[in-house]
Amino acid sequence: MFTGIVEEVGSIKRIQKTANQSMQLEIIAETVLEDVELGDSIAVNGICLTVTTYSKNSFSVDVMPETIKATSLNGLKTHSPVNLERAMAANGRFGGHFVTGHIDTTGTIIKKEAQENAVYYEIEVPRHLEAYFVEKGSVAIDGISLTIFKNRATSLLLSIIPHTVSETTLGAKETGDIVNIECDMLLKHVHHLMKLGSVAHSDQLNENFLINNGFM
């Protein structure tokens, strides 16, 4: 579990293709290595990955075919910057929102515009995920906990403060770039339960039910 508060920006040291659709990444880092252990989870651009080896200044992770297909990792190159966050400590402050590191989709930046001290990003998203985006609600973009400024059927508008622009990879992103998107976990669970409930009771909610219970 993560919070979406990026601890540092690392960089890709090595990309090794281990098969047609899997790879191993070696990532240069500092802060996230302070108490690292084998098997620890580290979010890399919002993707929960497991530490397989580490040294004083880098760590390695294995990436499965499904993860490559579902995320933007295929676009990484040597020296690419990446957002890094260790799994949330139970005794730490919770500064962002619940982030699992399981990417729901990727989106494309379709507009970037400076507005006084903020930068507005508009990101194209699939229409079928519209139910999971709420104005003033949370979303994780490349592992960054952000607030949705405005949402449309197929895009999100985000207003980014200077600190986030300078301390994450988002500041260097431009129109056309691909980002990882994780929807709010709580919204996903509520939506799922509501769908299950409506299916379970669909045979009961009819005209006779409404009449018998005083609705008609």
Image (cartoon, rainbow, N blue to C red):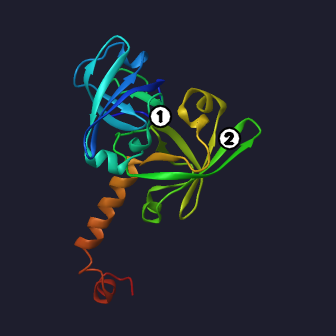
- Horizontal arrangement in the rendering, residue 154 relative to residue 34 (left or right): right
Residue 79 placement (x, y as % from top left): 47, 27
Name the kind of residue labelled 2 in the image.
Val
Q: In front here: 166 or 4?
A: 166
Q: Which residue is mark 1?
A: 96
Q: Quadrant of residue 28 in the image?
A: top left
Identify the residue at image location x=45%, y=26%.
11
Asked whether 38 or 184 is in front, the reply is 38
- Residue 119 is marked as 2
The three-letter amino acid code for the residue at tag 1 is Gly
Task: Examine the rendered structure and indicate whether residue 135 appears above or below residue 35.
Answer: below
Count residues near mark 1 (Cα–Cα under 10 Å), then give few for <14, some for 14-19, many for 20+. some
Q: Position of residue 128 (x, y in %)?
A: 42, 65
Task: Identify the residue at the far top of this view.
Answer: 56
Secondary structure, mark 2, is strand
In the image: residue 210, left or right of residue 140? left
Q: Secondary structure at mark 1?
A: loop
Q: Position of residue 189 (x, y in %)?
A: 33, 53
Residue drawn at (33%, 46%) of the image: 68
